[in-house]
Image (tube, grey):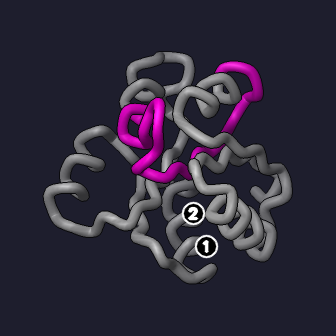
Amino acid sequence: MSNMKVLVVDDSATMRRIVINTLKTIGYTNILEAADGKEALAHIYADNIQLIITDWNMPNMNGLELTKTVRADDNYKNIPILLVTTRGVKEDIVEALQAKVNGYIVKPFTPQVLKEKLEQITNNS
């Protein structure tokens, strides 16, 4: 499981580093990163990504648009997607689930929360 290829998508380099360090702490070693949804798609199409952890609010293509694009593509639609966001209101969560994200965590989060959520979505996929 730990050498699953994970793509971390966030326009904040600091936030990417936090997520990547957290992933390393819980045993993931094969990690790529992207600054927005467009950059993420390039990795998804080229790098055999097995798990996507994406921020919601980003320029160029946000996490929700990224999710919808991936879900609309038969080759990639089954990749588990975890949406990370500061937006915790119910309408947002509903919108995210309708876009078929596998999971949803609100910033700030602890390594334990990330670990549990990843175990949930990678075991269910």
Residue 99 position, x and y percent, is: 29, 38
Q: What's under tag 1, amino acid-wise?
A: Lys
Tell me which residue sits at (66%, 23%) in the image: 42
Q: Within the magenta stretch, is there residue 56?
A: yes
Residue sitting at x 43%, y 42%: 63
Answer whether labels 2 and 1 touch (C-beta < 8 Å): yes
Q: Residue furthest top?
A: 74
> Residue 115 — which label?
1
Q: In the rendering, which numbered label is found on residue 80?
A: none
SS of the residue at dot 1?
helix
- Image check: 13 left or right of 83? right
Residue name at image x 71 percent, y 72 percent: 22
Q: Which residues are magenta?
A: 45-67
The local crowd at label 2, few if under 14, some if 14 to 19, many if 20 or more residues have their Cα within 10 Å, is many
Q: What residue does disc 2 label? A: 118
Report the Cα–Cα distance between label 2 and label 1. Answer: 5 Å
Give the position of the N terminus as an image quadrant: bottom right
Q: Nearer the viewer, residue 36 or 73?
A: 36
Q: Quadrant of residue 50?
A: top right
100 over 83 or under it: above or below: above
| Residue beneath the point at 69% across and 35% down | 49
Give left or right: position of 27 versus 120. Answer: right
Measured from the top left, where is residue 90 in percent x and y? 16, 64
The one nearer the camera, 76 or 35, is 35
Q: Is residue 109 magenta?
A: no
Q: Please, what secondary structure does the residue beneath circle 2 have?
A: helix
